[in-house]
Amino acid sequence: MQPVVTVGLDGSPESLAAARWAADEAETRGLPLRLLHAWPTLAPEPARLPGEAEQNRAARRLLAAAEAELRAAHPDLSVVGSLVADDAEHALLEAAAESEVTVIGSRGLEPAESYFLGDVGLPVVARARRPVVLVRAGTTEQEAPTAPAGRVVVALKLHGSSDDLLDFAFRVAAARSAPLLAVHGHGAPPHARLPQEADHGTDEHRTRDPRDRLDDALAPWRAKYPQADVAGSVRSDAPERAVVQAGEGAVLLVVGRRRHRAGPAPRLGPVAQAALHHGRCPVAVVPHD
């Protein structure tokens, strides 16, 4: 199948924000955009019952309105509508397996609202084979025109391979001509656990190694993208808090998810969970080994 960017569309403000972000991403990548609307009770044409016919008409209207808006904003973009008679989670997972990027809307920020994110978004993010981006209403440049151009932020651990995350983050940053910030949080600084009169001189020595390892991880990618504006930051804070704070004002926050985690079902780590529930910008979750 031809590479494509897919967005899940249900007519909510969040899914429309996701569609606008996905259209920008598809245009940047030179790929078609697929608008996917899934509903289990969609009926094959011609619909036999009045309720089926109305559901089909509503689904077509939803796609037609989104297509019209996106074509007006992106006249050179190939936009394809896709109606699927299926459960939304299953349809999105199937689409994600054959898409370069899958984009869905997210409402999850406050604890009382987080079940909306978990309803479809979290299972898709936790199981998808390829990158998934979650977008909240009000976080795209079109919806926040006064916001300054931001950077791409990628959260890195310093053990194991980060190649999949860095490949995705560098590609997005280069395509958008955006600066890239790689962030690693490594917990409280040593002197935070020492008495006030203790010598703090060893803190710089203890944080030098993470900085060196971060530079080592970025070195081949800096060579591959010599024009990229890249910075690394090692922060003496809990990784979850460091990443969410670094993502403030970003155009995209990129976090990772292990493809094979122990347990009965796929799940997200604490950094990805924090980014999805508390990040105020679009968040990309990239599966990696």
Image: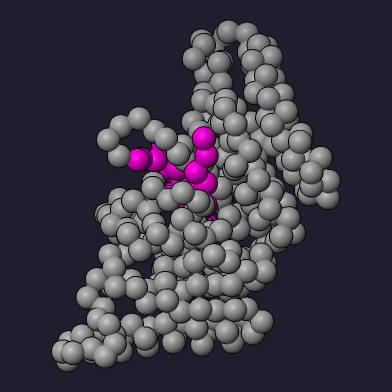
Residue at 27% from the left image edge and 35% from the top image edge: 264
Q: Is residue 105 above or below residue 152?
A: below
Q: Position of residue 125 (x, y in %)?
A: 41, 51
State the colouring used for the structure image.
Answer: one colour
Q: Position of residue 248 (x, y in %)?
A: 56, 51
Q: Position of residue 71 (x, y in %)?
A: 57, 84
Determine if residue 256 is in view: yes
286 falls in the magenta region: yes
Residue at 63% from the left image edge and 38% from the top image edge: 163
Judge left or right: residue 141 versus residue 17.
right
Residue at 55% from the left image edge and 79% from the top image edge: 79
Residue at 44% from the left image edge and 87% from the top image edge: 64
| Nearest to the observer: residue 145 or residue 195 | 145
Judge left or right: residue 109 versus residue 229.
left
Q: Position of residue 181 (x, y in %)?
A: 67, 44
Q: Which residues are magenta?
A: 266-289
Judge left or right: residue 266 versus residue 142.
left
| Nearest to the observer: residue 94 or residue 108 | 94
| Nearest to the observer: residue 78 or residue 125 | 78
Q: Residue furthest front?
A: 1
Judge left or right: residue 111 versus residue 131.
left
265 falls in the magenta region: no
